[in-house]
Image (cartoon, helix red, strand yellow):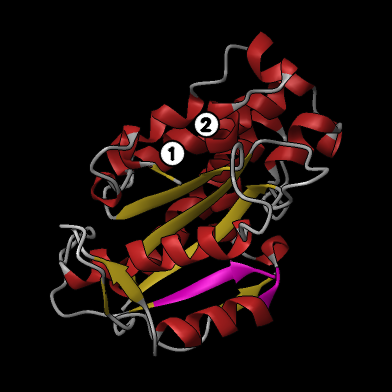
Amino acid sequence: MYLMYVDESGDTGLTGSVGRYFCLTGLVVHEARWRDFIAQLLEFRKVMRRVYGLPVRGEIHASVFINSRAYDLERHIRLAILRNTLDELAKMDFISFTNVVVDKQGKAADYNVFENAWKTLFQRFENTLRYGNFPGRHGNDHGIVITDATAGHLLTSLMRRMAVYNPIPSSIGLGSRNLPITRIVEDPHSKDSAVSLPIQMCDVVAYFLYQRFTPNQYIRRSRAGAYFDRLEPVLNKRASRVGDMGIVLI
């Protein structure tokens, strides 16, 4: 069983929106390596406490780290912790990140940013499971989705619909076929990011995915706009044949 933890960055609004992009990041790890994953994250947090004074159980929330004086640490220290987080994740050859970005510019007024982003992420998870392309290549395996505590009822409804009716356009332009989701089991589960290290990792990656497209003033000044690219070794590049770094841009 593969577990996909998901978090987002940006907003889903089209009118009155504060940003052009909405980003989703899915962190995938197989159950057989889950304890290894958590153990490595805990060891990393101990290093961050020893080097920078970050509490081991303190939540890492990227936007809060950048925009407020979290844990009474200087801003450049907080950015260093986030950079070290990305570098630590990049060393874990048994995890994978699938990333979806919605460019809201030019979308029709009735375009559903939330639904299209999540539907795309679910479909990429399903496809990669079906072809056995996640680390470890566990054949004929299934997956489950764990999210931050956000709009759980909407995600449950979307997943259940895709399990029954999921039209996929033909690659040669001849209509579409119904290919229901079969590899993702159960409804999406929600978990508070404050007590979930994997979701906190998703938060950091989603934040820098967003900053890759539209960096804020501090990120530009700190030359941190390309920090997302540090994850290159663990990105699911099969998610998109045309997207840079495997990013699915819709």
Local SS, label 2: helix
Give the residue displayed 60% in from the left and 29% down from the top. Answer: 211
Please report the bounds of the magenta region as a residue range.
144-152
Q: Is residue 24 above or below residue 218?
A: below
Q: Magenta stretch containing residue 3, yes or no?
A: no
Apparent side of residue 20 relative to residue 205 in the rendered image (left or right): right
Q: Is residue 13 left or right of residue 202?
A: right
The foreground one among 237 and 169 is 169
Left or right relative to 146: residue 30: left
Amino acid type, mark 2:
Asn
- Asked if the stretch drawn in magenta spans residue 148, the answer is yes
Which residue matches tag 2? 84
Q: In this figure, which residue is indicated by the disc labeled 1?
A: 88
Identity, as a three-letter code, of the amino acid under mark 1: Glu
Residue 58 position in % (x across, y down): 73, 51
Q: In terms of depth relative to the viewer, which is nearer, 124 or 74?
A: 124
Element under label 1? helix
Please identify the residue farthest to the front as the structure is shown. Answer: 174
Q: Residues within 10 Å of mark 2 (few under 14, many from 20)?
A: some
In what quadrant of the picture does the N terminus appear? bottom left
Classify 237 as above or below 227. below
Could you tell me if the residues under marks 1 and 2 are in contact, i.e. CB atoms within 8 Å? yes
Residue 113 x, y percent position in the rendering: 61, 56
Q: Residue 25: percent from the left, percent from the top? A: 50, 52
Q: Residue at x 48, y 85 (%)?
A: 161
Residue 138 appears at what percent x and percent y? Answer: 16, 71
Q: Which residue is drawn at 58% across and 84% down?
A: 157
Q: How many marks?
A: 2
Q: Residue 149 carries which label?
A: none
Task: Tell me which residue sits at (68%, 62%) in the image.
Answer: 193
